[in-house]
Image (cartoon, grey):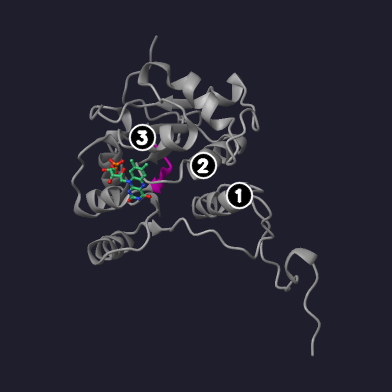
Amino acid sequence: MEPPHNDTSKPDPGRRRPWVVGISGASGTPYAASVLRGLLAAGEAVDLIVSRASRLTLMDETGIAFRDAHWRTDLREWLALGADGKPETYPVTDERLADVRYWPAGDLAAGPSSGSYPVKGMLIVPASTACVAGVALGLSKDLLQRVASVTLKERRRLVVTVRETPLNGPTLKHLVALDEAGAVVLPASPAFYAGATHIQDLVDFVAGRVLDAAEVPHGLYRRWEGELRGGSKGEAPEAS
Ligand SMILES: Cc1cc2nc3c(=O)[nH]c(=O)nc-3n(C[C@H](O)[C@H](O)[C@H](O)COP(=O)(O)O)c2cc1C
C-alpha cells in the first residue's frame, strides 16, 4: 500500500537537492560553463535557468543558439567549449548531464519558483546589472529573478556574480541591498596571483571562487599558500 503523503515515519534521504544556476545576459558565459562543469564534477544536481537576454551573449561568445526544445544538446556543446572557443576541450558524457534539469525562463510555475521545492541555493553566473536590479527590488520579471527572490526569502545561499564595468550609482546601491539581504556579491574579477597562463585559468579562478562560496569542493585554481612566487618564473623576488 502507498504511504500517505503525511507519513513522517521515514526521513527522505534520497531527495534530490540541486543548486539552481541562473545565467543572465551579462558577458561572461565561460564563467557559467566552468561553474556548471565544476558542480557536475562534484556530483551536484543542477537546475538550470537561461534568461532570454543570455541567449544573445551565448550566441555572441560561443556561436551557440540555445534552444528550450534542444537544451540538452546545446548544453553539451557549450560545456565542451574551452574559454578560447576550442570545441570538445571538455567532452561531457550523458551520464554527467543526467542530473541537470532545465526550466525555461518564462515558466513562472517551474519547481524552483516555490520555496517548498528543495534546493541548496542559487548561483547567478554571470549576473547582469538588470538582473541585479530586478533581484534587489524583488521584481521577479522572469523565473531567474523569481528564484533569486525565493532563495533570499528562504535564507538560502545566493551568489551573484555581477559583470559590468564601470558600475553606476544605482547598481552599487542594488549590490549593497543584495549584500544586506544575505547574498554573496562576487564580482567576476579574476586574480593574477594564482599563476594564470591562459584565459581559461582566469575564468576558472572566478568559477572556483563561486564554488567556494557554495562550499562545493573543486580544483579549479591554485590557492594562495602564503608565499610570493615571483611571477611566471615561479620564484620569489630576491630580498635586497
Ligand atoms: C553581447 C551583449 C553583452 C552584454 N554584456 C553585459 C554585461 O557585461 N553586463 C551587463 O550588465 N549587461 C550586459 N548586457 C546587457 C544585458 O543583456 C541586458 O541588460 C539585459 O536586459 C539583461 O537581461 P537579463 O538580466 O534578464 O538576462 C549585454 C548585452 C549583450 C547583447
Q: Secondary structure at mark 1?
A: helix
N-terminal of the two: label 2 or label 3?
Answer: 2
- Left or right: where does residue 72 sit relative to residue 90? left
**Which of the four quarters of the rendered structure image does ligand 1 lie in?**
top left
Q: Which residues are magenta?
A: 119-126
Measure the alpha-carbon separation of dots 2 and 3.
14 Å
Q: Quadrant of the N terminus?
A: top left
Element marked by disc 3: helix
Q: In what element is the residue under mark 2? A: helix
Residue 124 forms part of the magenta stretch: yes
Mark found first going from the N terminus, 2 or 1: 2
Disc 2 designates what residue?
30
CB atoms of marks 2 and 1 within 8 Å: yes
Label 1 – label 3 distance at C-alpha: 21 Å
Measuring 67% from the left and 48% from the top, which residue is drawn there? 219
Kind of residue indicated by mark 2: Pro
Q: Which mark is residue 199?
A: 1
The local crowd at label 2, few if under 14, some if 14 to 19, many if 20 or more residues have their Cα within 10 Å, is many
Image coordinates of residue 237 in percent, x first then y, are 78, 78
Q: Position of residue 220 (x, y in %)?
A: 64, 49
Write the residue at 59% across / 53% down. Answer: 202
Q: Furthest-top residue in view? A: 1
Does 18 appear above or below 231?
above
